[in-house]
C-alpha cells in the first residue's frame, strides 16, 4: 500500500475539517434571543429539531466547550443556512442565518442576519453579557493551511472588510488568480464577532465578486463562516452558497477547517486603499 | 486602515507541540464499554464524568481527544496507558508496554477483530506539523523501526523502535520510543510516543509522554509527505 495514495485531496477545503462532534446527541437547549424570537434546539445523533422543524445538522468544536452547529432549512420555501455558536462556558449563543433570493438583480446574493442571546440553564440567572461585534482582530494577519498546498492569507484591516491573498505559485493562486484579476481587489465584505478572549466568529460574504463577475466565476456568493481559535491557532467553519456545474449554479454546503500560522504581509499590500469604499 | 506587526496570530505559539491539539471530546462521558480480546481477556471501562474513568474498578483521570469520526484517543493518568476506542469499526487498542487488541462488546465479535500489527507504512516519510514552527519528521523504515526528528533539528534524525497497527480505513496507530533530548521542541524526557494517524485526511492525534514522570503532552496536527 502506498499511503500517499490515500489522502482525499479532492476534498479540498474540507480535508482538514475537525472530526464531527456527536456530543450534543440527546441535549436540549432553550435559547433566549435578543430579537425576541426564542429558539428551542433538540439534538439527536444526526438530526436536530429547531422550533419544531427537523434538519440534518453538523457539529464541530472550536474549543472544549464551544460548538459550531450548522444546518440547512427551508421553512418558508427559501433555502437558509442556520449556524449557531453554542458557548456552554459562558452560556451564550450567536445565531447566524443566511439565504439567497432577496436581491432581484443578483438572485444568488446572500443576505446575512445575526442574533445574539443566552442559553437558559436551570438554577442560573440568564447572563446579561453577549457575544459582540468587535474590532479586536483589526491588524491581525494569519495564514490558513486548508491542505498542505491550499493556503490562504487573511489580513483583517477594516471593520466590514477583509483582504485575502495567496501563496505565490500555490494551488490557491492557480485556482483563483484568473478570476481575481478581473476585479479591482480581493477585499471582501466581512464581520467580526468576539466569542471570548482569542476566539472570534469571522463571517465573509463573497458579495463584491458576485456583483462584479456574476456567472463568470466558479463559486457564487458563498457565505464563509469561521470560528477562529487564536489560542490553538486553528479554525472550524462552514461554507454555504452555490457553485457552477455545467453552467448551472448548484447548491454548495461544506464543513471545513484549517491550521494557522503567523504571517507578516508586505507593507505595500497592507497599505493599499480599499477600492470598494469611498 | 490599520497594520501592526504584533497581531493575535503572532501569539499562537504558547502551547509548544500541543499547539494544534483538537478540543477535548466529552462524548464518552457517562458511557460504559466492555472490551474482549481474542484470548478472552476482558476490560470494563466506565467513563464517570468528563475527567474520571473506572477501569476494571480502578479509578483514573483521563483526557480524550477525537482522532477521527467516532474514534477516540483516550489518555489515562494511570501509569502509561492509552486506549483508542474505535466505535465506528468496533475495536479498541490498549497501549501499555505492548499493543493489545480488543473487540468492543455489542459492536464486534472478539473472534473478528480487524485491527492488528502491520507493515503497510514502511517506506513512507511524513512531516507532522503540530504548531506554527513545531513539527515531527517521521520516516517508516520497517515494521519495527522509524526514524524520528523533531523541530528545530530535522538534521538530527534517530532510529527508534516502533510498532505499527492498522485500525482500518486509512487509520493507523503508532507506538514508538521517542527521540527527546535537549534542544528539541519536544520536552526532554518524554521518551515515548503514541499516535493515531489518519491518512485519508493526513491528520494526527497523539501524545508524547514519560512513563517515569507520568508527564504527557497531547497533540494534533497535519501531515505533509516528504518530497512534495
Image (cartoon, rainbow, N blue to C red):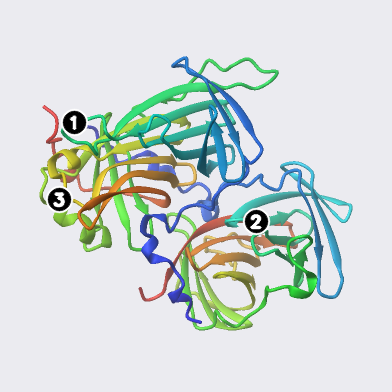
Residue that numbered label 2 is attached to: B72
Give the answer, above or below, for where A257 lies relative to A227: below
Q: Residue at x 39, y 39 (%)?
A: B8
**Residue A75 as seen in the image, left or right of residue B80:** left
Question: Are circles 2 and 3 on residues that touch, CB within 8 Å?
Answer: no
Q: Secondary structure at mark 1?
A: loop
Q: Residue at x 39, y 31 (%)?
A: A97
Q: Are the residues under badges 2 and 1 in a single subunit?
A: no
Q: Nearer the viewer, residue B37 or A144?
A: B37
Q: Residue at x 46, y 53 (%)?
A: A17
**Spatial separation of the CA atoms under disc 2 and disc 3:** 44 Å
Q: Which mark is residue A216?
A: 3
**Residue B5 as seen in the image, left or right of residue B31:** left
Quadrant location of residue B105? bottom right
Residue that numbered label 1 is attached to: A104
Depth check, mark 3 against mark 1: the one in front is 1
**Residue A188 as seen in the image, left or right of residue B131:** left
Residue situated furthest right in the rendering: B57
Chain ID, mark 3: A
Which badge, 3 or 1, is on the more N-terminal residue?
A: 1
| Quadrant into which the C terminus of chain B falls | bottom left
Q: Position of residue B9 (x, y in %)?
A: 39, 43
Chain ID, mark 2: B
Amino acid at each position: 500500500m502506498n499511503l500517499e495514495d490515500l489522502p482525499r485531496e479532492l476534498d479540498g477545503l474540507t480535508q482538514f475539517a475537525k472530526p464531527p462532534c456527536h456530543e450534543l446527541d440527546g441535549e436540549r437547549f432553550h435559547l433566549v434571543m435578543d430579537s425576541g424570537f426564542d429558539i428551542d434546539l433538540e439534538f439527536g445523533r444526526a438530526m436536530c429539531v429547531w422550533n419544531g422543524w427537523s434538519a440534518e445538522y453538523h457539529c464541530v468544536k472550536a474549543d472544549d466547550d464551544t460548538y459550531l452547529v450548522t444546518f440547512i432549512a427551508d421553512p418558508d420555501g427559501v433555502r437558509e443556512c442556520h449556524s449557531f455558536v453554542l458557548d456552554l462556558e459562558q452560556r451564550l449563543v450567536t445565531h447566524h442565518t443566511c439565504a439567497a433570493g432577496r436581491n432581484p438583480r443578483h438572485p444568488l446574493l446572500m443576505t446575512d442576519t445575526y442574533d445574539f442571546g443566552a442559553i437558559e440553564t436551570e438554577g442560573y440567572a440568564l447572563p446579561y453579557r453577549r457575544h459582540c461585534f468587535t474590532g479586536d482582530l483589526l491588524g491581525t494577519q494569519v495564514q490558513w493551511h486548508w491542505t498542505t498546498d491550499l493556503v490562504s492569507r487573511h489580513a483583517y484591516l477594516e471593520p466590514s472588510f477583509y483582504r485575502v491573498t495567496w501563496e505565490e505559485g500555490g494551488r490557491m493562486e492557480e485556482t483563483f488568480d484568473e478570476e481575481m484579476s478581473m476585479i479591482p481587489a480581493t477585499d471582501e465584505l466581512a464581520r467580526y464577532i468576539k466569542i471570548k478572549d482569542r476566539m472570534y466568529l469571522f463571517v465573509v460574504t463573497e458579495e463584491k465578486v458576485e456583483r462584479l463577475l456574476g456567472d463568470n466565476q466558479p463559486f457564487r456568493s458563498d457565505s464563509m463562516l469561521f470560528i477562529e481559535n487564536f489560542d490553538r491557532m486553528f479554525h472550524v467553519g462552514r461554507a454555504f452558497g452555490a457553485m457552477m456545474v455545467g453552467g448551472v449554479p448548484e447548491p454548495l454546503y461544506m464543513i471545513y477547517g484549517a491550521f494557522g500560522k503567523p504571517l507578516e504581509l508586505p507593507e505595500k499590500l497592507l497599505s493599499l486603499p480599499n477600492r470598494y469604499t469611498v | 486602515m490599520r497594520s501592526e506587526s504584533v497581531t493575535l496570530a503572532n501569539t499562537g505559539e504558547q502551547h509548544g507541540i500541543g499547539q494544534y491539539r483538537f478540543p477535548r471530546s466529552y462524548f464518552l462521558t457517562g458511557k460504559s464499554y466492555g472490551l474482549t480480546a481474542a484470548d478472552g481477556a476482558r476490560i470494563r471501562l466506565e467513563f464517570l464524568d468528563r475527567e474520571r474513568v473506572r477501569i476494571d474498578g480502578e479509578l483514573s483521570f483521563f483526557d480524550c481527544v477525537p482522532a477521527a469520526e467516532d474514534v477516540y484517543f483516550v489518555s489515562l493518568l494511570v501509569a502509561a496507558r492509552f486506549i483508542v476506542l474505535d466505535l465506528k469499526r468496533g475495536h479498541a487498542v490498549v497501549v501499555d508496554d505492548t499493543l493489545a487488541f480488543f473487540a468492543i462488546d455489542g459492536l464486534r465479535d472478539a473472534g473478528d477483530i480487524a485491527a492488528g500489527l502491520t507493515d503497510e507504512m514502511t517506506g513512507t516519510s511524513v512531516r507532522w506539523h503540530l504548531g506554527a514552527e513545531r513539527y515531527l519528521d517521521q520516516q517508516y523504515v520497517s515494521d519495527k523501526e522509524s526514524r524520528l526528528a523533531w523541530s528545530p533539528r530535522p538534521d538530527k534524525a534517530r532510529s527508534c523502535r516502533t510498532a505499527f497497527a492498522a485500525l482500518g480505513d486509512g487509520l493507523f496507530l503508532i507506538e514508538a520510543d521517542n527521540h527527546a533530548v535537549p534542544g528539541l521542541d519536544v520536552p526532554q524526557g518524554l521518551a515515548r510516543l503514541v499516535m493515531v494517524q489518519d491518512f485519508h485526511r493526513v491528520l494526527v492525534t497523539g501524545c508524547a509522554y514519560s512513563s517515569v514522570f507520568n508527564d504527557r503532552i497531547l497533540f494534533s496536527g497535519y501531515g505533509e509527505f516528504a518530497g512534495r
